Amino acid sequence: MHLFTLRHLHRILMEVPGEIGSGGNSGFQAVNVALQFGARDIALAGYDLACERGLHWHGPHPAGLNNPTAKTLAEWRQRLDDAAPALAALGARVCVVSPSALKNYPRRDLRDWLEDGNGSS
């Protein structure tokens, strides 16, 4: 069993194993966890971080859960875009493989990314 501690910092944390940065959203946290497990080829799928199609790409959350605002999504997007240099410095090759408002990562077709063997590391 692996235990992670969430720090309310908006940056990728690698100094302490099991301690990850929040970024304010689970997508940011998932990238940090993947890095701590040794992943260096990372494809961002479903990271649209926009509200052009409504509250989320999947529609509104059910009652009892908050839905993000355009302001919140912009903050999350900025935090992940701001992490690009730190990710590159760690040797991570991060790309976007689905529609996304992110700006600081190259775009790839998921099928091409998988065929190139990137999904195996």
Image (cartoon, rainbow, N blue to C red):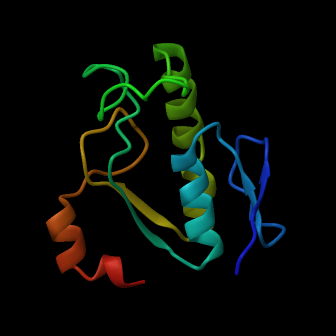
Q: Residue furthest front?
A: 63
Q: Nearer the viewer, residue 56 or 37?
A: 56
Report the residue at 55% width, 25% height from top: 64
| Quadrant the C terminus occupies | bottom left
Report the residue at 36% width, 29% height from top: 56
Task: Judge from the rendering whether residue 99 lies leftward or rightward of residue 55; answer left or right.
Answer: left
Can you say whether 61 is above or below 113 in the image? Answer: above
Provide residue 77's location: percent of width, then percent of height.
49, 33
Task: Judge from the rendering whether residue 23 lies leftward or rightward of residue 4; answer left or right.
Answer: left
Provide residue 98's location: percent of width, then percent of height.
25, 48
Provide residue 58's location: percent of width, then percent of height.
30, 35
Task: Judge from the rendering whether residue 111 lies leftward or rightward of residue 38; answer left or right.
Answer: left
Can you say whether 104 is above or below 2 in the image? Answer: above
| Quadrant the N terminus occupies | bottom right
Can you say whether 19 is above or below 97 in the image? Answer: below
Q: Nearer the viewer, residue 60 or 55?
A: 60
Report the residue at 29% width, 33% height from top: 57
Provide residue 26's location: percent of width, then percent of height.
56, 47
Report the residue at 35% width, 32% height from top: 101
Q: How many marks can you see?
A: 0
